[in-house]
Image: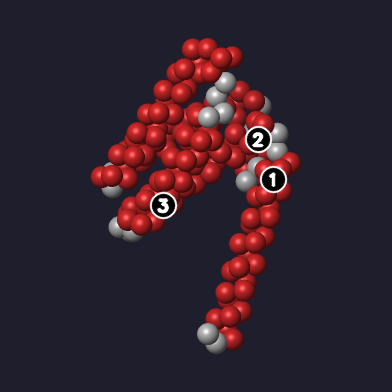
Amino acid sequence: MNHTSLQSARKSHSAQAYVNIGLETQVLSASSEQLITLLFRGALTTIAKAKIYMQNSNISGQGSAISKAIEIVDSGLKASIDREAGGELATNLTATYEIIIRNLLQANLHSDVEKLELAERLLSEIGDAWQTAVGINHKEASSAL
């Protein structure tokens, strides 16, 4: 590896470390409402990456991104629902997350951009409703990233 390549690798590593520290700081200082917003943004970001991978026929990248989105929806968003206190709303939201997960699985299995976009649209709508319900405006949501 020559000197220029080594410098470039160090810069890239340093930039990633900075991003990781910034995200960790945001997570540690975030309210419960902001954490849910971070989960929505994370899922939507990974779906956007999956779409790019899909369009470029990068099956490995597509699979990794969709798997990460499924993990965020299933272990983050769906797991955070208080089914006892939430009643019918919680039941419906859980079912909607299941539909999103199923669409993500089908998108990955068949490289189906329409299923991916449906999952993205549903998540975006729920995320927007969440931000409205908890009073997080779009500027706050963006800075939560």
Which callout, 1 or 3, points at the residue further toward the start of the chain? Answer: 1
Crowding at mark 1 (Cα within 10 Å: few <14, some 14-19, many 20+): some
* Kind of element beneath mark 1: helix
Q: Which residue is mark 2?
A: 34
**Pair 3/2: label in front:** 3
Which callout, 2 or 1, points at the residue further toward the start of the chain? Answer: 1
* 81, 136: nearer the viewer: 81
Residue 128, x across and y down, in percent: 54, 30
- In the image, what residue type sits under mark 1? Gln
Q: Are marks 2 and 1 in contact (CB under 8 Å)?
A: yes
> Which image quadrant for residue 3?
bottom right
Crowding at mark 2 (Cα within 10 Å: few <14, some 14-19, many 20+): many
Outermost left residue: 110
Residue 67, x across and y down, in percent: 42, 46
Q: Is residue 113 something one can see in this rendering?
A: no
Image position of 15 (left or right of 71) = right
* 129, 39: nearer the viewer: 39
* Kind of element beneath mark 3: helix
Marker disc for residue 64:
3
Q: Residue at x 32, y 45 (%)?
A: 108
- In the image, what residue type sits under mark 2? Gln
Q: How many marks?
A: 3
Image position of 37 (left or right of 113) = right
Outermost right residue: 29
* Kind of element beneath mark 2: helix
